[in-house]
Amino acid sequence: MPTVPVLDAKGKKGATVELNADVFGVEIRVPLLHQAVTRELADRRAGTHASRGRSDVSGGGRKPWKQKGTGRARQGSIRATQWKGGGKPFGPKPRSYEQDLPRAMRREALRAAVAARVADGGFSVIESLDVADGKTKSLVTKLEALGLKGEPTLLVVSALDGHVARASRNVPWLSVETPAHVSVYQVLRARRVVCDRAGLQTLEAALAHPGRTQRDAPAAGHPQRPPASRSPLR
């Protein structure tokens, strides 16, 4: 079972906390991580790109010259694709880039991402992080005491209050999230993942259970069946 030390406000190691091996010690599946990151980045795309075709550009309603007798190539409209200012053939149209990934695979990918940070020593636990004045300077001072400065860092807090959110806005290398909104891309992009103790318990509880619902529970007198959302990779 992996263990990590708990750091105080001055960055000194105190007690150690044992991490759930079913969450923080799972096998790191690189293809699954790649699929999860690709899906997340694709979902961020707006998909609002568009170009104007022949039916969208203005003009070109009549034939520019007669079909025969001019010695020039025949033309039907000055808005054909070969004309300057004409419509674009097969141009981009608004579309959705969203990709589907089963919930069980998303959970497994997040477990693998966190386990990768634990394995390479980039996962830390702190008691709590309090920025009472909400100033960036105070937050950076506390982070420097923890040995964090300059490298991409993900801070996972149990509850995101206004002071921490305001103080972290001007820190380009810091991202702050709650356990319910942590994504695979955020964990893999950060070189260091710092989690407060309460947030660690919430994150561990969320990833330890496969998310079974009442509909998946077997009825009385019927043999138990595996949940329909169970991934074949597990």
Image (spheres, helix red, strand yellow):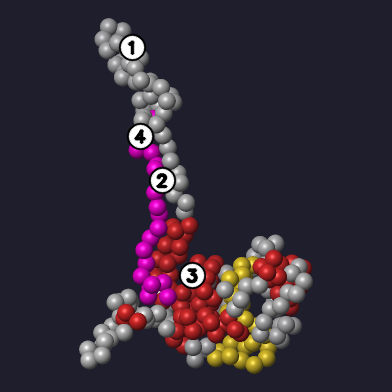
Is residue 66 depicted above or below 200 in this figure? Answer: above
Which secondary structure, mark 4?
Answer: loop
Identify the mark at residue 65; answer none if there is no mark.
1
Q: What amino acid type should be assigned to the residue bearing mark 2?
A: Pro
Residue 161 x %, y %: 66, 72
Image-based side of 3 in relation to 49, left or right: right
Among the 4 quarters of the image, the one containing residue 64:
top left
Q: Distance between the residues labelled 3 and 4?
A: 38 Å
Single out the mark in the foreground, 4 or 2. Answer: 2
- Would you name the residue on which mark 2 appears? 94
**Residue 16 among those drawn in magenta:** no
Say which label, 2 or 3, has the lower sequence index. Answer: 2
Identify the residue shown where x is 22% and y is 89%. Answer: 222
**Residue 90 among those drawn in magenta:** yes
Identify the residue shown where x is 30% and y is 11%. Answer: 66
Q: How crowded is mark 2: few (under 14 residues within 10 Å), some or many (20 or more)?
A: few
State yes or no: discs 3 and 4 in contact (Cβ < 8 Å). Answer: no
Q: How far apart are marks 4 and 1 (CA)?
A: 23 Å
Say which label, 3 or 1, has the lower sequence index. Answer: 1
- Would you name the residue on which mark 4 appears? 89
Q: How crowded is mark 4: few (under 14 residues within 10 Å), some or many (20 or more)?
A: few
Instruction: Considering the whole magenta stretch, tell me its main secondary structure.
Output: loop
- Would you name the residue on which mark 3 appears? 184
Say which label, 4 or 2, has the lower sequence index. Answer: 4
Which quadrant, please, contains the C terminus? bottom left
Single out the mark in the foreground, 1 or 2. Answer: 2
Image-based side of 145 in relation to 193, left or right: right
**Which residues make up the magenta segment?**
87-107
Identify the residue shown where x is 50% and y is 69%. Answer: 183
Q: What amino acid type should be assigned to the residue bearing mark 3?
A: Val
Q: What amino acid type should be assigned to the residue bearing mark 1?
A: Trp
Q: How far apart are marks 2 and 3 (CA)?
A: 27 Å
